[in-house]
Image (spheres, rainbow, N blue to C red):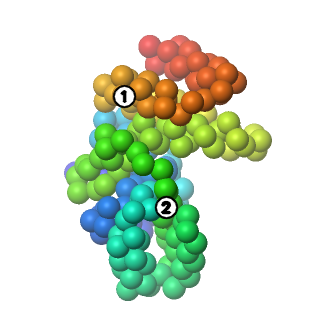
Amino acid sequence: MMELFEKYTEKDEYIVKELSKLKLFLIGGTAIDLWCRKLHLKPWRSRSNNDIDFYTPASNKYGVKSAITFLRQNEFDDIAQDPFIVHAQNVDKTIEVDILIDNETLPPYLFKKDSGISVMSPIFLFASKFDRFINTYDSQRRKTDRMDLLQLMDIIVKMNLVDDFEKFLQTRHYDENAQSIIDTLISTYNEKYS
């Protein structure tokens, strides 16, 4: 049986499934990898080797508190929290977990459950990756993010989510420059994947 996502330790899947029960939704490279494998797409890159990221609404206070307790019980000794993020690293420094805490109210169709894992929709993953893409000047990060964005477009198309994708992008109220970048990405996607 194919792995749900690329794993680097024997605890990766256990941690993801347990935190999913607390309404923490997988994001980042691990989420992209999960969607690729579900659709039998080859991920263009490996996920970060010790990094598992989650998203949760600020209203999920119980989930965040329970996640911290769970992490402590599973040998995460370096835990820092502020109102927007929980960062945890295990004792042997082989796993880092970040929990992003957001005050924005998102539409329910962006929250998915697949194979026992709570995971954000590729639409959300695209939007959050795009927001970083347009706000960074690090050329290597922009190159990586650009490829992730193209991969996410492919996932969105293969999952028949284009209408929801367009609807969600309209709610983001991007300026003319950002919209031009999206148009260029769509054009590049059409040339590469069509």
- In the shown orientation, is residue 170 left or right of residue 147? left
Compared with residue 133, is residue 9 higher up or lower down, i.e. above or below?
below
The percent position of residue 106, horizontal first and vertical second, equals 40, 45
Position of residue 20 measured from the top left corner of the image (x, y, whole percent): 31, 62
Q: In the figure, 187 relative to 15: above or below?
A: above
Q: Residue at x 36, y 41 (%)?
A: 107
- Three-letter residue code for mark 2: Ile
Q: Say which amino acid is labelled 1.
A: Asp
Regarding mark 2 in the picture, which secondary structure is present there?
A: strand
Name the mark on residue 177: none
Q: Say which quarter of the image contains residue 13.
A: bottom left
Dot 1: what SS?
A: helix
Question: Residue 168 location, x and y as percent?
Answer: 44, 31
- The residue lying toward the viewer, choosing from 143 and 176, is 176
* Label placed on residue 101: 2
Residue for badge 1 = 164
Residue located at (37% from left, 56% from top): 25
Q: Residues within 10 Å of mark 2 (few under 14, many from 20)?
A: many
Q: Earlier in the sequence, mark 1 or mark 2?
A: 2
Q: Quadrant of the C terminus?
A: top left
Q: Is residue 133 above or below residue 23?
A: above
The spot of residue 100 in percent (x, y) is: 50, 60
Residue 83 visible in the picture: yes
The residue under the point 33% across, 47% down is 111
The answer to whether one can see residue 33 in this image is: no
